[in-house]
Amino acid sequence: MKRNFADSALSARRINRRALILGGAQAALMAGLGFRMRHMQVDQAEEFRLLAEENRINMRLIAPARGLIFDRNGVVVAENAQNYRIVIVREDAGDVDEVVDRLRRLVHLDEAELERSLREMHRRSPFVPVTLADRLSWEDIAEVAVNTPALPGVTTEVGQSRHYPMSEDFSHVVGYVGPVSDYDLSRVEDPDPLLQIPKFQIGKTGVENKLEHLLRGKAGSRRIEVNAAGRVMRELERHDGTAGADLQLTVDHRLQNFVQARLAGESGAAVVMDVWNGDILAIGSAPGFDPNLFVRGISTTDYSALTENMYRPLANKTVQGTYPPGSTFKLVTAIAALEAGAAGYDSTVWCPGYLNSGGRRFHCWKSGGHGHMNLHDALQQSCDVYFYEVANRCGIDKISEVANRFGLGVRHDLPMSAVAEGLTPTREWKRLRRGEDWMPGDTLNASIGQGFVLASPLQLAVMTARVASGRAVQPRLVKSIGGVETDVVEDGPLAASDAHLQAVRRGMYAVSNTSRGTAYRTRIEVEALRMAGKTGTSQVRNITAAERARGVFRNEDLPWERRDHALFVGYAPYDAPRYAVSVVIEHGGGGSAVAAPVARDVMLAALHDGAVPPLEAYPAAQREEIREQQEALPLRPMSAQEPGRSRA
């Protein structure tokens, strides 16, 4: 049927209107898309460029070189050794198990270490590199590098690992590093990003721990380009960061080695200190241990061997161990009595072998007594009754005050682990800590370094240095940081009468150089090097009245842990003091028989720049015995860094 003109015109208008609406909608859509594209390409271009870069560019931290540690002569005692390792990034590897299986076919992997690494990987973020194996040979690394196309996510790296070339000699001084643990992280409020790197090494004990903030350095970074499979294509940018500061200690590695060798077979400690500036030249604790065992995580077998050893090789006895100082404490009691007017230089006390006080009998070490004793004779022969009497007159508070002034009962600020404060008791201390009144017998026990009194070998060395120099010298362990000399603490004169100090020094000289002195057998024969000293023997058990009646057991007849501690303190040369020494031998027996010979040898080595002492320094009758002893010492060979130096 033929449509009329009016219908056709109406139909055309409707089509045109719909076309315009549709076209307008299309135009609006295209305009919206165009605006959005412009917004994304122009306004948001930087944001999307960064997003794209993050897919293509990875940022990784570079661990800085740890600062080196040297002895006072510039010989390295803690260094960084080159270490080849294999790392894996979980998000780049895909099927980790398959990649590890392929890796096993190329190089030997320690299964226990691998298991720990895989556990660590699943605890960390997927983009954090995890070390699968380290300490590999160059051949192993080359083999892996050639096969990297078949090992997605795996890369080879050259890093650094701590190494201690002096092994046991500095184990308690320098300490050791180890991998960061969860415990380490829990102790830090705002952890350094470096600590998140698996197996990153930080100081655990000793100087390594206490000066970690100086030794660690600042992290570097690198930008690497990776492809769609996560494989590293190239390094775009690298910033190596800042290496840690180098440290130089005051310790002489030759003397330190001699001390450790001389203490071999014993459980004990020795400290050598400059009496004028406080420099610690040797600070040895025996037995030692190999700190290299801890660097990458010590095995259960090795750790058990250390913890089950009754000589406690992991304990730093020089600063951590506190012992009753025995008769070495009589130096303090003597000065306190002189200052309080409780004793004079020539006034005497009668020693019948005991003193009765408070219904108890306090015995002298010499059961038959010493007879009339003045200060000089009492120090020379170590008469207990003399010091009981003068201590009873001056009181414990005065004795403790003098002890603190001479460095006992004070925590000395050294960068070493677990530095002990020791104990110099007072009436108030006993009331607050024990809820008991101070008894007269407590004073008598304290006067001869027994009872509540405790001191470390370091504190005894400080005490001796102050007696020798008359100055409030402070111990120093770090000589320089980053090549800049550290300050010697301005000590100033000691608040003590020079006349009192001279009287005590004369008594100490008599101990080592007169026939009645308790250390006469261990004297130094060369007049210019003669040592002044004081022996000490401290009990670790009570001797009952019944035991005294039937005869006190000899130390060698008792179990090792019930024997007395042997102690000796001294300085030399007597006329021009240079060094102070303290020696403690745990459960060694008598101080004159056990500790004094060690102290003499150590002092002579110090006076000869760490070399084995010449036989001429010993009494003629002892030289053959000393020669055999020296030949048996387990000394370290002379360092290659010191050409021309001889130990003989």
Image: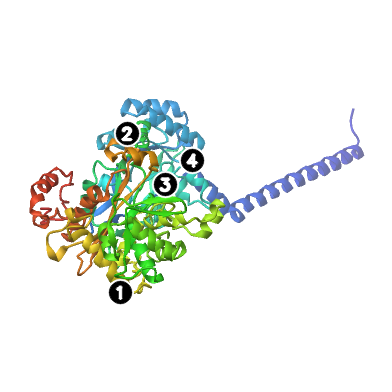
Q: CA distance from mark 3 to mark 2?
A: 19 Å
In the rendered image, the quadrant that contains the N terminus is top right
Q: Is 188 above or below relative to 563?
A: below
Q: Amino acid at mark 1?
A: Ala
Q: Amino acid at mark 2?
A: Val
Q: CA distance from mark 1 to mark 3?
A: 74 Å
Mark 3 lies on a secondary structure that is strand
Q: Which residue is mark 2?
A: 144
Mark 1 Cα within 10 Å, few/some/many (few <14, many 20+)?
few
Q: Which mark is residue 224?
A: 3
Q: Residue at x 37, y 44 (%)?
A: 540
Of the pair 621 and 145, the residue shown nearer to us: 621
**Of label 3 and label 4, which has the lower sequence position?**
4
Q: Amino acid at mark 4?
A: Phe
Mark 1 lies on a secondary structure that is helix
**Of label 3 and label 2, which has the lower sequence position?**
2
Q: Which residue is mark 1?
A: 499
Q: Residue at x 21, y 46 (%)?
A: 261
**Of label 4 and label 1, which has the lower sequence position?**
4
User: Would you say residue 371 is visible in this rendering?
Assistant: yes
User: Which circle, 4 or 1, is nearer the viewer?
Assistant: 1
Q: Which mark is residue 127?
A: 4
Q: Position of residue 137 (x, y in %)?
A: 26, 36
Mark 4 lies on a secondary structure that is loop
**Of label 1 and label 3, which has the lower sequence position?**
3
Judged left or right of residue 257, residue 430 is right
User: Which circle, 3 or 2, is nearer the viewer?
Assistant: 2
